[in-house]
């Protein structure tokens, strides 16, 4: 038994890059010495846990790439070595496969005990075991994080649906050299869609490249776009049981601007957008565009790829606003979170693991914030020294977004289950408008009517 | 069939039973019947049931009668998906079959190199709808891609393949035709079945290559042609992967084929009732078309065993 | 006469080889991509020569995920694929014999049903099917991926039926006169004569099964039972970063078993095809 544990710990240490591990001894040991060696900590762990409760098996799944799979598995093994009575059966997957399987597991009431969800969590709300009781009874210790960070993984009624694995937000990455060459002023925090449009047109005219590359139109034009109208508006209301605006024309501007830019050749047409299979293929990377929409957790990959392509510098700024002094419309979100499922037979054990995964410093020295910016202060501090300059930019940007004025309102990070269908419809009508099959007004009206009919 | 004859060996009732055509038939058919009853019929009936419900795969379904079907015929995206699917079938099936038959026929030459060539032509079918193919295809048909560069050399204006609603289908059709390996293989197997004595006899009668192709190869191969035709029809109606990895249904739904729309509605939007209804409508359309092909096949398929 | 033949042979070879190269180009691009890094793959270059030969992609890819390497994935894939192919060949030929050669009551109906089962898209039967396998506790085992193949695959059943039409009925009748029963007609006459279609079945079914991703994804639980088709996808993450190099490296290796099967069995489709009358 001990031998196996040692092996497990050794591999964990290897992934860790041989940083010391195991100082966070199980609950009852008082002294947590950072100097504890691997072997010693194994001994405390194993002698301690032999007296403990019966064996528990938890199932867990996530999606990701090789790096994420390796690191997550190493953390699972670290946890198992600290809690010998717990066995975690894990399933690493790819994104499409993950959600296909989740769909079937939901239908057969067999969802994994611990599972990963993105901002689409409300869809699976009925399958999520909320963590409020565990937080109340101390199973999960949330003293190391802030209310703001907890709230991004909670629903409109304050139910804690999961613990956030990383904070994320959106922004515009731009190539300052191109702005300079075209004689366009670099964007500032208060720039507007009008500034954006003029920048696109001027850059296109002067440099014969796209002013802007592919956008997440739903976010930019609808979800965020409505919020930019004023603090009283949002696409969905705060209860998520209806729309948060009643004027379809709030959607019109973005659609007509997109059409105008495509027609002018300043924005890639839908076909050219399809050529971008991956963020590393973005037109900003290839030097064919001056700006692009980016999720903050992809910014590092984007600027790395751009650098490899000879583009020295990219900068990150918040998306344009409707009014220079109006709301920014963006908020920080949970890029991913870990949730406990209703189908779990051991929700408390699953919750304990999630707390460990998100807040344990050793675990996070293995994970290295691969899922996004951590939410527990201790973890953030521990990782702070190892940040690259690009990562520091992203941290700073996310902090800026987090400090934006929300008009004194708490923003509801959740969106209703019908969001995917509405988003699909939005993109459909946007393309119809771009191809001149309907006007921007008609498209906006059609999306509005469809969205309204979903409630 | 004269079944008295095989009964001759034993006169007992058991023998009469066991050698009866019905018994023989169901003994050999048994695997299919069992598999169908255990694994296939229930999912099929469930999907028919779901097609009359509102089912999001999370909450329990609610019965809504034929509402899904009524909505389908009001859904311009669904009607459009039928249109573009039919268009795709119309182009891709004949092209793929003709190409597969052409290459299979060329590769019947008695040459050592044939085996090598055939592997060359089969290889593309081994990478399916992988990420690599999707990337290559996007690069080939990109605005500044290889195809447009070569068109430029010929003095033809570059085509915006993925951005233009009328051209977007061609990369997908070409990809389908490109992966013609299994059709080619089946044709090759069929060509091998044709007894060489037929050709020798024709040669003695003074037939040239062209004549023996039409008088011998085509009729002898006709059952296999029918098979490949039916199967390609069915799989083209359900075209999914190619569009999924290359265009995602765009631009403006120009390649939003029916199976892709089923996926969008059923899996992405979790509208499984609606997706099931769509599938059953298409099942009817496909059945009708398949039936028509079967009926006409009586006139052109040469059936050695029935004649 | 002879000169003309040489010319036509040369033209034939040039044409076939040139077209073949065009066809195989994307495959070669993927193979060369297995020696490139992300930037080189995504640069939009269609060049086949990697700027630097990055063999480490293979090492990084083969390492797999956690402690499970591609050795395991290949073993699983070969096991599942072999059994499934075997099942398909045996059962489909039996069923095809019944539908094509035996005149029993309900033959037309069963044929129609068989064609009908191919007409519903996988997405709508996926969940009910999963529920069945779940009910009989097969989820988490390779059984749902293997056992159904022993109950025939409509595509191959119909294909074999079509091949049987070219076997003259006189052969059956002669065999019966010689004392064969309807059962032994299958094993002694029909099955041996089906060789070309059985070989096509093996080649095609092996590939389809090897390439199948949805089935293994839904039914295999543990990473130690994953197949190559799943593992290859685990390099891709649309929401953060995809490791294209290792992914292409493993995709390339993944083609080897299927291609080997093709090479081994293709010989039988070529050998003895000396139809001397066949000249262009």
Image: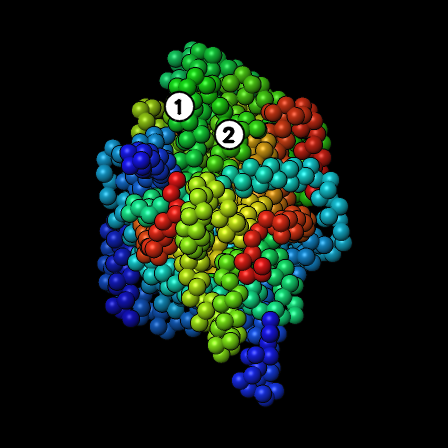
Of badges 1 and 2, the one in the foreground is 1
Disc 1 on helix, strand or loop? helix
Quarter residue B105 falls in: top left
Left or right side of A347 for B277: right
Which residue is found at the position 42% from the left and 46% from the top? B203
Who is closer to the viewer here, A81 or B96? B96
Return the chain for callout 2: B
User: Circle 2: is it few (<14), some (14-19), or many (20+) Cα within 10 Å?
Assistant: many
Which residue is found at the position 57% from the left and 29% from the top? B165
Left or right side of A109 for B100: left
**Vertically, is B194 above or below A192?**
below
Q: Is the C terminus of chain B in the top left, top right, bottom left or bottom right quadrant? A: bottom right
User: Circle 1: is it few (<14), some (14-19), or many (20+) Cα within 10 Å?
Assistant: few
Residue topped by disc 2: B162
Who is closer to the viewer here, C162 or A393? C162
Question: Which is more N-terminal, label 2 or label 1?
Answer: 1
Q: Where does the image place residue A25, in percent across and percent down from the top left?
A: 33, 60
Which residue is found at the position 49% from the left and 23% from the top? B159
Query: Looking at the image, can residue C209 be seen?
Result: no
Left or right side of C65 for B80: right
CA distance for labels 1 and 2: 17 Å
Return the chain for callout 1: B
Disc 2 on helix, strand or loop? loop
Residue topped by disc 1: B150
Q: Where does the image place residue B231, in percent across and percent down from the top left?
A: 54, 50
The tag on residue B229 is none
Query: Looking at the image, can residue B20 be seen?
Result: yes
Q: Are marks 1 and 2 in contact (CB under 8 Å)?
A: no
């Amino acid at each position: 038994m001990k031998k196996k544990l040692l092996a497990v710990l050794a591999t964990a240490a290897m992934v860790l890059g041989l940083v010391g591990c195991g100082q966070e001894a199980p609950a009852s040991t008082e002294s947590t010495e950072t100097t504890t060696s691997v072997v010693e900590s194994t001994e405390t762990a194993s002698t301690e846990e032999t007296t403990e409760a019966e064996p528990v098996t938890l199932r867990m799944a996530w999606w990701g790439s090789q790096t994420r799979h390796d690191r997550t598995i190493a953390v699972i093994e670290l946890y198992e070595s600290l809690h010998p009575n717990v066995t975690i059966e894990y399933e690493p997957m790819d994104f499409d496969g993950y959600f296909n399987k989740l769909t079937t597991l939901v239908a057969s009431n067999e969802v994994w005990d611990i599972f990963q969800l993105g901002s689409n969590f409300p869809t699976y709300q009925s399958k999520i075991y909320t963590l409020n009781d565990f937080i109340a009874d101390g199973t999960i210790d949330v003293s190391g994080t802030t209310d703001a960070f907890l709230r991004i993984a909670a629903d409109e009624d304050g139910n804690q649906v999961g613990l956030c694995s990383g904070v994320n937000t959106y922004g515009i990455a731009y190539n300052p050299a191109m702005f300079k060459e075209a004689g366009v002023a670099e964007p500032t925090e208060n720039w507007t869609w009008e500034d954006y449009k003029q920048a696109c047109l001027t850059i296109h005219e002067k440099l014969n490249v796209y002013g802007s590359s592919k956008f997440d139109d739903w976010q930019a034009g609808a979800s965020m776009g409505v919020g930019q109208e004023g603090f009283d508006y949002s696409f969905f209301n705060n209860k998520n049981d209806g729309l948060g605006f009643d004027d379809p024309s709030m959607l019109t501007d973005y659609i007509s601007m997109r059409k105008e830019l495509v027609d002018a050749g300043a924005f890639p047409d839908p076909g050219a957008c399809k050529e971008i299979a991956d963020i590393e293929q973005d037109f900003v990377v290839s030097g064919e565009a001056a700006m692009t929409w980016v999720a903050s957790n992809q910014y590092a990959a984007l600027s790395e790829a751009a650098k490899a392509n000879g583009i020295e510098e990219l900068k990150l700024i918040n998306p344009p606003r409707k009014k220079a002094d109006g709301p920014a419309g963006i908020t920080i979100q949970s890029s991913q979170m870990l949730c406990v499922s209703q189908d779990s037979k051991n929700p408390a054990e699953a919750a304990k693991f999630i707390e460990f995964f998100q807040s344990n410093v050793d675990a996070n020295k293995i994970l290295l914030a691969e899922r996004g910016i951590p939410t527990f202060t201790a973890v953030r501090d521990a990782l702070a020294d190892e940040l690259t300059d690009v990562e520091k930019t992203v941290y700073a940007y996310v902090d800026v977004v987090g400090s934006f004025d929300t008009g004194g309102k708490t923003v509801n990070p959740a969106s209703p289950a019908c969001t995917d269908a509405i988003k699909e419809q939005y993109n459909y009508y946007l393309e119809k408008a771009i191809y001149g099959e309907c006007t921007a007004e008609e498209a906006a009206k059609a999306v509005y009517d469809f969205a309204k009919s979903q409630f | 069939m004269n079944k008295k004859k095989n009964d001759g060996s034993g006169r007992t009732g058991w023998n009469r039973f066991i050698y009866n055509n019905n018994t023989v038939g169901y003994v050999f058919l048994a695997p299919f019947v069992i598999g169908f009853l255990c694994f296939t019929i229930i999912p099929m009936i469930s999907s028919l049931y779901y097609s009359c419900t509102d089912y999001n795969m999370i909450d329990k379904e609610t019965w809504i009668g034929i509402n899904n079907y009524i909505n389908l015929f009001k859904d311009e995206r669904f009607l459009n998906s039928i249109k573009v699917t039919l268009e795709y079938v119309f182009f891709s099936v004949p092209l793929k079959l003709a190409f597969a038959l052409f290459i299979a026929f060329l590769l019947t030459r008695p040459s050592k190199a044939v085996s090598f060539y055939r592997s060359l032509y089969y290889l593309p079918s081994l990478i399916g709808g992988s990420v690599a193919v999707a990337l290559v295809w996007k690069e080939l048909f990109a605005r500044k891609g290889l195809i447009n560069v070569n068109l430029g050399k010929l003095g033809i204006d570059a085509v915006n393949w993925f951005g233009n609603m009328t051209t977007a289908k061609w990369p997908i059709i070409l990809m389908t035709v490109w992966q013609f390996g299994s059709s080619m293989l089946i044709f090759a197997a069929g060509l091998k079945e044709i007894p060489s004595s037929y050709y020798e006899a024709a040669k003695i009668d003074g037939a040239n290559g062209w004549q023996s192709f039409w008088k011998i190869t085509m009729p002898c191969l006709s059952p296999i042609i029918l098979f490949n035709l039916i199967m390609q029809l069915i799989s083209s109606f359900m075209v999914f992967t190619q569009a999924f990895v290359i265009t995602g249904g765009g631009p403006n739904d120009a390649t939003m084929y029916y199976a892709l729309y089923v996926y969008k509605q059923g899996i992405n939007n979790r509208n499984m009732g609606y997706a099931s209804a769509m599938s059953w409508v298409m099942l009817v359309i496909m059945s009708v078309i398949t039936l028509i092909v079967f009926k006409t096949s009586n006139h052109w398929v040469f059936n050695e065993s029935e004649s | 006469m002879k000169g003309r033949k040489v010319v036509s042979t040369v033209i034939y070879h040039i044409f076939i080889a040139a077209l073949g190269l065009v066809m195989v180009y994307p495959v070669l691009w993927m193979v060369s991509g297995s020696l490139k890094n992300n930037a080189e793959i995504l640069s939009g270059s269609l060049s086949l020569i990697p700027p630097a030969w990055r063999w480490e992609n293979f090492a990084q890819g083969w390492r797999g995920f956690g402690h499970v390497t591609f050795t395991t994935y290949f073993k699983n894939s070969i096991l599942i694929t072999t059994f499934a192919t075997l099942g398909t060949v045996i059962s489909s030929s039996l069923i095809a014999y019944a539908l094509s050669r035996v005149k029993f009551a309900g033959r037309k109906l069963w044929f129609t049903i068989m064609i009908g089962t191919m007409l519903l898209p996988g997405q709508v039967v996926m969940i009910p099917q999963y529920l069945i396998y779940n009910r009989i506790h097969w989820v988490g085992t390779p059984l749902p991926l293997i056992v159904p193949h022993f109950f025939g695959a409509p595509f191959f059943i119909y294909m074999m039926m079509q091949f049987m039409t070219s076997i003259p009925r006189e052969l059956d009748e002669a065999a019966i006169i010689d004392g064969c029963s309807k059962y032994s007609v299958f094993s002694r006459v029909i099955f041996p004569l089906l060789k070309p279609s059985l070989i096509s079945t093996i080649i095609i079914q092996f590939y389809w099964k090897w390439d199948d991703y949805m089935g293994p994804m839904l039914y295999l639980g543990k990473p130690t039972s994953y197949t190559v088709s799943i593992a290859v996808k685990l390099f891709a993450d649309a929401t953060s970063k995809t490791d294209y190099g290792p992914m292409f490296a493993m995709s390339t290796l993944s083609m080897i078993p299927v291609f080997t099967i093709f090479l081994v069995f293709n010989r039988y489709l070529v050998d003895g095809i000396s139809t001397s009358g066949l000249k262009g």
